[in-house]
Image (cartoon, rainbow, N blue to C red):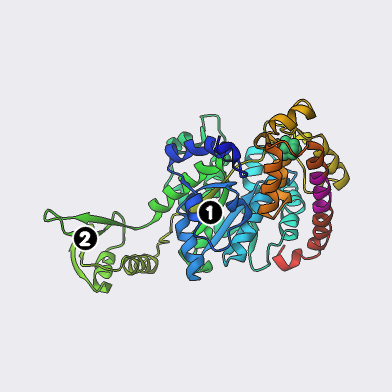
Amino acid sequence: MNMKLDPWGSVNIDDYSKLFDEFGIMPFEDICAELSDPHRYMRRKMIFGHRSYDLIKDAMKNKEPFSVMSGFMPTGGGHLGHKMVMEEIIWHQKMGADAFVGIADREAYSVRGISWDKCRQIGIEDYIVSLIALGFEPDGHIYFQSESENVKDLAFELSAKANFSELSAIYGFSGETNVAHMVSAITQSADILQPQLSEYGGPKPTVIPVGADQDPHMRLTRGLAHKMNMFRIEGREDKNKNKFFSVRSKAAPEGSLAEIAERLPWDTKLFEGHIDIYGADDYNKLLETVREVEIENGGYAFVPPSSTYHRFMSGLQGGKMSSSVPESLISLKEDPKLAAKKVKRAKTGGRVSLEEQKKLGGEADKCSVYELLMFHLVENDNELAEIYDECVCGKRMCGTCKALASELMEEFLTDHQEKRELAKDRLDDYGL
Ligand code: SF4
């Protein structure tokens, strides 16, 4: 009963909680309380989970370097679901992140057979122009995978650390899967790790805002980041219960462990393949020294990427939002008046009669119009909570919500499309 009265839809979030248990994704709620000005997707629990977001939170708080990265496969039709990712990227950019957006044309080519020319046209027209219109700043980086030598080179190196069994376990690849599809999966890992290359300032926390279904990419990439690194730091305990650290290496260049030992101000014992460190009272200094030596020896010292996971909006007719069912979604290029009509036809959580709705209240948790208001159209939390309360206690009727949502949607799209026209003239500023 309590869960039903949560204006941010905790009932649905609960369904995602399996991800916490099965894959070790952490709930976002606790960390959100420590952010000074969380985005509405965070406040309203649409972003429900994370991996290692504490690194990002600390970097924002301490004004240290961090990055945000995400990508779009140019298959056509940027819609409200893509807007969510765009807004998350832009929010992190405003919070100080070096922002990266990759257009996954290699993936579109290998998986969907879309030509390079078409990939470029769709990438710009449907994704990049809207991204800029929503506020992406020119100091960020927008690129096409096929044109990024960094990404292609890094993908090749990463592929030396991944094998077919691993990829088939993660993505379900079979003997029929074309090789380019496998290359494109590794290319995404290269996209994610690119912000940590030396030309962008080297290792740093990087957050990847994704939908819940994208976690396999994160697991693969975090695993590859570990495998690429030369050293591993472990906390240990000897037989007298004294705590100490070990730095281990399987493949570091000769002498590099000795270099680490020399630079540390604590007691160190050098063995073949590892060093033990006693009395280390500053883990960050230890980590920095290890990374410094790795980079000087030609390594990457990647910080395994962080991620946030957001819920998906339902389709306007209920069920899933799908690009193959135009009635289920609203495109960012859609005629505002037609979009407003779609909103008026959307499925609500209303009861069969006005009388019943007054008696039982509406079901805002199952209402796609309420979702539009919550995800996109109402910024003020109190206003939204009031709509929710009025709905569930039977004071509000669906016609009022539909009129409000369709008016706000028409306004948003009209404004967004004007900004898109301006964005088209600014592509040069983004190196496109
Ligand atoms: Fe949805 Fe509004 Fe109807 Fe409630 S009153 S079910 S929020 S449209």
Q: Nearer the viewer, mark 2 or mark 1?
A: 2
Residue 76 on image: x %, y %: 74, 43
Q: Looking at the image, can residue 395 be seen?
A: yes
Location of residue 303 with respect to 117 vertically, above or below: below
Q: Is residue 193 depicted above or below 431 in this figure?
A: above
Residue at 67% across / 53% down in the picture?
A: 382
Instruction: Tell me residue 341's x, y (percent).
Output: 85, 39
* Residue at x 40% of width, y 65% of height: 298
* Residue placed most toward the observer, 261 or 11: 11
Q: Residue at x 88, y 45 (%)?
A: 337
Looking at the picture, how far across and down is residue 273, in whole percent?
23, 57
Residue furthest toward the right? 337
The residue range painted magenta reads 404-413
Mark 1: which secondary structure? helix
Q: Which kind of residue does numbered mark 1 sit on?
A: Ile
Q: Give residue 233's position: percent from left, percent from top.
A: 30, 58
- The residue tagged with tag 2: helix, strand or loop? strand
Q: Which of these two is toward me, 106 or 5?
A: 5
What residue sits right under mark 2 in the picture?
Answer: 244
In the figure, is residue 40 to the left or right of 292? right
* Beta carbon at label 1 within 8 Å of ligand 1: no
Left or right, 76 with reference to 17: right
Location of the N terminus by quadrant is top right
Q: Which residue is mark 1?
A: 192
Tell me the crowding category of disc 1: few under 14, some 14 to 19, or many 20 or more residues within 10 angstroms, Cα based. many
> Which of the 4 quarters of the picture holds residue 281?
bottom left
Residue type highlighted by circle 2? Phe
**Depth check: 153 or 272 in front?**
272
Q: Point out the quarter of the image occupied by ligand 1.
A: top right
